[in-house]
Amino acid sequence: MAAESIGHNCGLFGIAGHDSAAYLTYLGLYALQHRGQEAAGIVTSDGERTYIHKALGLVNDVFQPEVLDRLPGTSAIGHTRYSTTGSTTILNTQPIRVNYQAGTLSLAHNGNLTNTPRLRTQMEREGSIFQTTMDTEIILHLVARSKAAAVEDRIVEALGQVRGAYSLLFLSKEMLVAVRDPFGFRPLCLGEFEGAHIVASESCAFDILGGAYVRNIEAGEMLIIRKGDIETRRLPQSVTSHACIFEFVYFSRPDSWIYGEKVDKVRRRLGKHLAREHPTEADIVISVPDSSNTAALGYAHESGITFELGLIRNHYVGRTFIQPGQERRDHDVRVKFNPVEGVLRGKRVIVVDDSIVRGTTSRLLLRMIRDAGASEVHVRITCPPVAWPCYYGVDIPTRKELIAAHKNVEEVRDYIGADSLGHLSLEGMLDAVEGNGDMCHACYSGQYPVPPDDDLSKEALERR
Amino acid sequence: MAAESIGHNCGLFGIAGHDSAAYLTYLGLYALQHRGQEAAGIVTSDGERTYIHKALGLVNDVFQPEVLDRLPGTSAIGHTRYSTTGSTTILNTQPIRVNYQAGTLSLAHNGNLTNTPRLRTQMEREGSIFQTTMDTEIILHLVARSKAAAVEDRIVEALGQVRGAYSLLFLSKEMLVAVRDPFGFRPLCLGEFEGAHIVASESCAFDILGGAYVRNIEAGEMLIIRKGDIETRRLPQSVTSHACIFEFVYFSRPDSWIYGEKVDKVRRRLGKHLAREHPTEADIVISVPDSSNTAALGYAHESGITFELGLIRNHYVGRTFIQPGQERRDHDVRVKFNPVEGVLRGKRVIVVDDSIVRGTTSRLLLRMIRDAGASEVHVRITCPPVAWPCYYGVDIPTRKELIAAHKNVEEVRDYIGADSLGHLSLEGMLDAVEGNGDMCHACYSGQYPVPPDDDLSKEALERR
Amino acid sequence: MAAESIGHNCGLFGIAGHDSAAYLTYLGLYALQHRGQEAAGIVTSDGERTYIHKALGLVNDVFQPEVLDRLPGTSAIGHTRYSTTGSTTILNTQPIRVNYQAGTLSLAHNGNLTNTPRLRTQMEREGSIFQTTMDTEIILHLVARSKAAAVEDRIVEALGQVRGAYSLLFLSKEMLVAVRDPFGFRPLCLGEFEGAHIVASESCAFDILGGAYVRNIEAGEMLIIRKGDIETRRLPQSVTSHACIFEFVYFSRPDSWIYGEKVDKVRRRLGKHLAREHPTEADIVISVPDSSNTAALGYAHESGITFELGLIRNHYVGRTFIQPGQERRDHDVRVKFNPVEGVLRGKRVIVVDDSIVRGTTSRLLLRMIRDAGASEVHVRITCPPVAWPCYYGVDIPTRKELIAAHKNVEEVRDYIGADSLGHLSLEGMLDAVEGNGDMCHACYSGQYPVPPDDDLSKEALERR
Amino acid sequence: MAAESIGHNCGLFGIAGHDSAAYLTYLGLYALQHRGQEAAGIVTSDGERTYIHKALGLVNDVFQPEVLDRLPGTSAIGHTRYSTTGSTTILNTQPIRVNYQAGTLSLAHNGNLTNTPRLRTQMEREGSIFQTTMDTEIILHLVARSKAAAVEDRIVEALGQVRGAYSLLFLSKEMLVAVRDPFGFRPLCLGEFEGAHIVASESCAFDILGGAYVRNIEAGEMLIIRKGDIETRRLPQSVTSHACIFEFVYFSRPDSWIYGEKVDKVRRRLGKHLAREHPTEADIVISVPDSSNTAALGYAHESGITFELGLIRNHYVGRTFIQPGQERRDHDVRVKFNPVEGVLRGKRVIVVDDSIVRGTTSRLLLRMIRDAGASEVHVRITCPPVAWPCYYGVDIPTRKELIAAHKNVEEVRDYIGADSLGHLSLEGMLDAVEGNGDMCHACYSGQYPVPPDDDLSKEALERR
């Protein structure tokens, strides 16, 4: 819940070889809406020309039937963008489509590059112009500047120059290219639907079509989908995978496969490990719906304490407005959650949540739970304290705002008003993801697999 | 889930004695949005004049800050209307405001009258005109025709002539009147917020303000709220309460009080009784989220079988559109629900749901669960089969469409593709609501507390 | 120009016997848009049922193709409503459709009744309710209360009880009824298109379809159009026609027939008479476009002084907004009109306009003309000073606001900054309309053909 | 009128040194709306940052108060874009804003370059990417590639490489640059308002603010406005001015100054010369409103034949829709114009118009005039036949569509159904513009001052 103040990722969907390419991309983006609610875009190709539509708004508002009718073709890529505070304009939506010497190329990006400022300065010195503030644009410049003949070689050459996090979908008139950076920071997987190849950030986008999950796209892997065939390449920069662990903790839907793993399984193990590390006497375990449901269930099963529905979430979207003098955060918590008094009254309650960011939301929620009659409130978080910024595409508040950067666990416990507070340890968290190899846990540990350029301050980052 | 094809009710909210009457009514309606998503309206009074705004759309779309600014005053009533298929126009929104000899009177109604056609014909014969197709309008005609002097006496006299289901909120310049019909078909309760009296269909509308639940408004009770005082009266037509039991089964939010009872408690007992009546060997219990969650938990606790999250629900609203040739219902089920394969694969699954209406949705959902690998699927429904129309404000499909009107349980089981199917018995359901006295269960039993007029066919009913 | 601060009328259009009834009514209303820009509505009948759509906004915004598709039938009536300042809501749009003992009846009204308060009070005493603040609703109540059997007899009976100004279109399932009040205050005429009978406030609505003007509908005449036949009746209250002369001066389009006369001919005679009554030495005659163009041309021809285009009008609609501290009227004049310096510089200019209402707009316009270099500015108005309110459907500012109610011509001349000011005399104006019999000129003369009820103050009038 | 099927230009407005820069630019664009109704955009600078907003739609829809509030600063440039059929998307709106090595630069362009394809191909070969299909983007690439230090020097260097028509407004954080190409194809003039320098395509944009016209910006002149000072430079490519004569004939508003000349004066002379070249016996002269009004008046004065208002134009904007089977052009003519029968009946009519393009509109209009009773119809056009495409920013239909490219005057006369048809001769037209030096009349004569590149077909042109 508290993780909601952590910016979501973006969502990617692509398809090649289907007569309803635009429509299916629309559905795929709809299933990925939780990864970005601010803007959406689709580019299609009919082999001769490409067609684009993008706008601010939810997928369902941006793509009406008459809009999809103007997007013919058998291949498509789509992007859904997460919401930052006001900085996004129509000019910063994706995919970006450009013309260059080899024709037309479109690109959708999830992630964040770490050597942007240096590259950009250098290219500007050579006379380039930039029309957006997105680092994605740099990749297209590099592709255009490549001396290679084939589009895929151009892409490989371009990616050799950028560092950081990127899951990318390229669409030219003839082909769709899907690629994950060598560290595999952000997810991307391959599926199949009615003979067409499909790719998406999470496999839940395949399910909505009735499509099948095929496999994870590996870190550093590039898929070239052309005329029904898939060719696989490896980016030359070979490293160990460092997939973002926060996808398991919070971002991804539990019904999705990411990194070759089912999210709900990992999330349940997070709950179980948490129960082992931070047991306590209590009457019930409740979750902060919906993102913590699975982990709370894991905690309950492991601890043997009864799982209950102690908070009801209001799912009607659209921000309610407040009156002058009201406090926005207080209002938002009350509009979004309602405690179930019959469940909580007189009970010792374990609240399983996925993070504490600023602490303010947790504090308000706990007050609400106590007002509903809980006699004790024990907070259990399915990951370590978030104390460091992310340079790989997750919009975490600045260190100044992160409560864990300034207070120890006991101080945080006191601030949010819990009877006890337990975070899953880094070891416990890594153990829960088991065979997934190395993962990126920089936001918890401060250990950055790819150090950002010196001149890359958090604020200079285009948040994606 | 399947109950979603049963038309929701409307939601009512009223407040008297608060400077932010319109804003608080807006918030209250937002919390009651699950009772009606088609239209919303608010009337306010500042003691001198009344102000109205109503429109088609969700509460959050209809009421923007600049709209609320045009609704001054310290008392207000609001209405949110459920969605039928296209028949509703701006002309059929509520509250209705009229001028008559005693001034201005506004009315919001949840329920359905049963002697409408006769009354209407009679009034038309006497020269009356009707500007809507809502039976609510009839009540206002009767109030206007009353020879009584006081508004409250006019209302009592008017209500003496109508039969059927009505929870009503009246607003004149000077007072707010809340009343439930003598059978108490539809809910209405009283609360308090910062010294102001508030009334609502469900208490969750109090919680969103930070207000307190005070008590149920009794069947046949009329509250007159005027200058800070509440006066209580009883409608003369004394009968036993027959509150709609479907509110417990499906309509109301689990965090609400209705009829003086906490919904989540009753719903949990429905699940427990169901477990006792229809036990089976299985590995897991899953719910069709969100409306069956609490009952599924009850079933799991009673049976000792593990509760799991086997279906993920997509909460982004706005109907996705389909392509020509696609089947709407099939599409909708897949967009709304995604099975969690890791939970279901190889498992014997008990699916707890709140009703089977036409059977088509259940069939599609079960196929999805089986495709995700469930080895057995046992369906348990928290109420008896719905086989009869409702004349009291619930929009149930015609008998022709109700699968239970034509097939026995075994045939339905076969149709939806379940390994077993069990419905909670009428006795079990009534036992679960315990001390709530007589309840209306006509949609299950065909026993109508108030027989409709001869000329009142289901189709002639204005569905509310 | 100045007349723009005088509220326009409403526009009526009806058709019977054409498969494209709704579409043609939409076009007709579009041509009548100058009579009302605030709201528009259409009711159609297919003989079995009636269909309605109405909303705030311009005709072109209210009626989109998908909306017209929901308005089947072969007969229709439509209404376009003029803009007052904010008071109009969706509840006060027309046509009004009601159900009553004889079925469904819809009504569109142009004009204003003068015995509303008395009738309304009396009906309320008898138990009637009113859902709008439009006096049109009263007529429907009277029709419903009539004991007559035939709809047309009911209408005659109802109209026997109301006084004032009304051009009306009624639509029942079976017939369309068009009627003008016995004084014929507001225009209404009959046309023909592809075998269908059409009626409209002005004949320009026939031209847009390619239809033909047939004749004026007489004061006190009622046309009953049913199954292709037209039946004519006369209202029993026989009087001399008193058609509103302001329609000739300003409201109607010059290409229209009203009252059996071509507007442009009358308007040209107004200009000619004005030239005879108020000659002056000057170099050029200019008009305040577009409403005074024809009269200015008449003035020029009669006087022999050259007609020039000295003011350009910006036709892009939609009110521009102002910044804090700016003066709205000053801004509006400058946005709407731009003087042509090359025409005006060093010239003695005669400005022909159709009225001076508050004087402020004229003053600003004259300053603009002088700033463009005019050496002398002589203002000529095509009618006498407007000094009295209208009770028959024209929204004239209160006497307090009318400059002519407080200042004599010399004082007004001084206020607006003209070198000379001449108004056409009442005699001259009446002479210009020639054979049109008696006309209503109450706003100039204070002579009211139908005295309003004692309790009918200007402010109490629902302005139509 | 017929000229309406010739695509309009774009409109430019800029201001430097005023606290209400965005608001005043909005007003200026509103006055220039006739030059482009498809999209509008504004960029502002506060010296530290620049701010942008652009969208499809009319100026009044694109810029609401809350939008202008997000455009702070004391300098601004704005652009209004004309409407082609559907090809324009949000991606092709202006101004374009880019980042490059020297900071941020925004550009608004009216005109069309003639060496685009060659430049673009060359730049793409060097690795550049293009995000729009507008040739304007090329100019920004050239500025970015310049090795010069100062922005103004970069611009001069860039413009040295492009050929064709351009009136440009550049905005950087520190300065506003206004420039016309060496041929001065498109207009641009300088004004003053409350101490701020203002520039616009036409001076009517100054008048709406209450600003003053100062002077024409010369062909090949560049103004650099910085910290309140204006510096003037000349582009090195010295040529004779060849301003577009069609601006006088049709595009510009008669109340504007362009090229240092008052439009209404020239347009009146066009009418007079036309009267001398093509006299005929007739009763009245009418104009096709509003664009031919001034010329018609000139014809009338010169010929001594009475000027009349024979056609009324419906000014309500928004395209009316047609029914299946209807003919769009026929419908549009009837919706837009209505003949005044009283003026036309029995008369020999001279119709003064500004062009015949395809001939279809003229034919429909003439039929309408004859149906209204005109006994003879003589068409007089204020320019020679339009027979050649424009490469300098005017969207003229292809030669295939231009009636004058295939038929001689007699054949056109026959086609449109006129009794006689006379075009002003090229000499007559040039004589009417008098001291304006050489002008571009390529669309009439086929004499192109700047020959387009070989590979520049009309269809390849991005129409501006």
Image: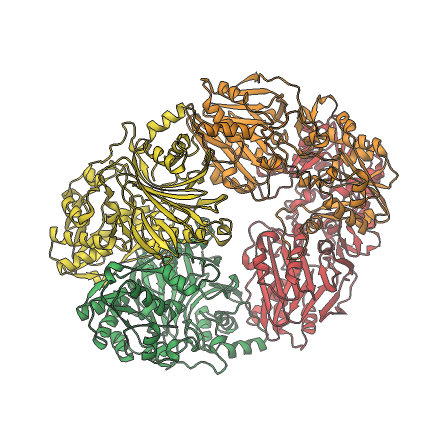
Chain colours: A yellow, B green, C red, D orange
Left or right of residue C322, residue C374 in this image: right
B377 and C209: which is toward the camera: B377
The foreground one among A326 and A450 is: A450
* Quadrant where the image shows the N terminus of chain B: bottom left
x, y (%) of residue A370? 20, 55
Compared with D4, A147 (above or below) is: above
Q: Position of residue D77 (x, y in %)?
A: 52, 30
How far across and how far down the image is residue B351, in percent? 27, 68
Percent position of residue A332, x then y: 32, 50
Name the residue located 77 percent from the left edge and 58 percent from the top edge: C213
Quarter-of-image position of residue A195: bottom left
Residue visible at 56% across and 16% down in the picture = D233
Q: Is residue A353 visible?
A: yes
Whether residue C10 can be seen here: no
Q: Quick one: B21 or D347, which is closer to the camera? A: D347
Relative side of C439 to D38, left or right: right
In front of the other: C420 or A278 = A278
